[in-house]
Image (cartoon, rainbow, N blue to C red):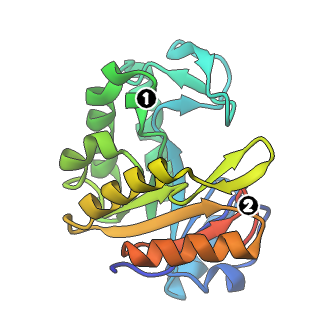
Amino acid sequence: MTGGPLAVYYGAAAGWERLARYDRVVLQPGSYPAEELGRLRRYGTQPLGHLSLSEDHGPPAPWHRHDRNPDWGGRYVHVGHPGWMQHVVDQARAMMAGGFGGLFLNSLNVELTFPEDLPHVLTLIAAVREEARPDYLLANRGFALLSRLADLVDGVLFESFSVAWVASGYAPWPPATLEAHARIAERLLGFDLDLYALDYCDDEGLAEFARRRARRFGLHSFVSDRALTRL
């Protein structure tokens, strides 16, 4: 098991003391001023800024597709649109200048929605890598790109590794899905990457199931609510 404890926290300002319990913490840009991010870094915690590569929550823009992500509400984008490419690179540059110690690359799994955008996602990751170098890049999933992605990032987070968010709350994935995720986790172990699992739940028994299963596959586990407001 490589890397160290990671938190993903999108809630209101938690205070650096609580965040400093982790080696790395993913935060939303704009939630913490540069001086607080600097304090975290001085105490040995690496703050990573959230950066979406295929969805946009901003105002209408020429790179938007018609559809939205039904789970999170963001507008899908044409990843290869030059305006979107520049927008993401500008965001990455601003986050690094604002005190972040690296970036969390989200919404990489376009093979499930717009597979034709996969080459553009890889190009965009490479551009962001140049902005962040030599600091830390953590990818959320991105398994369809893994053989190339592993040369561009420092770690991979497996979101919803063991537990699914369903209409009635939270539940373990069905056995077939758990087995599929296990095969992916075993493949991840073949790369020189820090490996993390993120699961959502509100029950300690389910949380322990997620933690235990992550450890079994060599992944550092972080468990929170779906809105990521719990440390």
Classify residue 16 by image quadrant: bottom right
**Which badge, 1 or 2, comes first in the chain's sequence?**
1
Numbered label attached to residue 112: 1
Around disc 2, counting alpha carbons within 10 Å, would you say few (fewer than 14), some (14 to 19), or many (20 or more)?
A: some
Q: Give 127 or 6, whichever is nearer the viewer.
A: 6
Residue displayed at 54% across by 31% down: 55
Q: Amino acid at mark 2?
A: Asp
Q: Position of residue 166 (x, y in %)?
A: 71, 44
From the viewer's perspective, tell me whether residue 199 is left or right of residue 220. right
Q: Which mark is residue 225?
A: 2
Q: In the picture shown, does residue 54 fall above or below 186? A: above
- Tell me if I can see residue 24 in this picture: no
Locate residue 41, reporting x and y percent.
Answer: 51, 79
Q: Crowding near pointer 1: few (<14 within 10 Å), some, many (20+)?
A: few
Q: Residue at x 23, y 55 (%)?
A: 150
The quadrant in which residue 121 appears is top left
Q: In the image, is 85 to the left or to the right of 145?
A: right
Quadrant containing the C terminus is bottom right
58 or 148, nearer to the observer? 148
Q: Position of residue 138 (x, y in %)?
A: 40, 59
Checking the image for residue 2, the label placed there is none
Q: Secondary structure at mark 2?
A: loop
Quadrant where the image shows the N terminus: bottom left
Q: How many marks?
A: 2
Measured as percent of width and height from the top left, residue 108 is found at 42, 40
Q: Residue at x 71, y 62 (%)?
A: 201
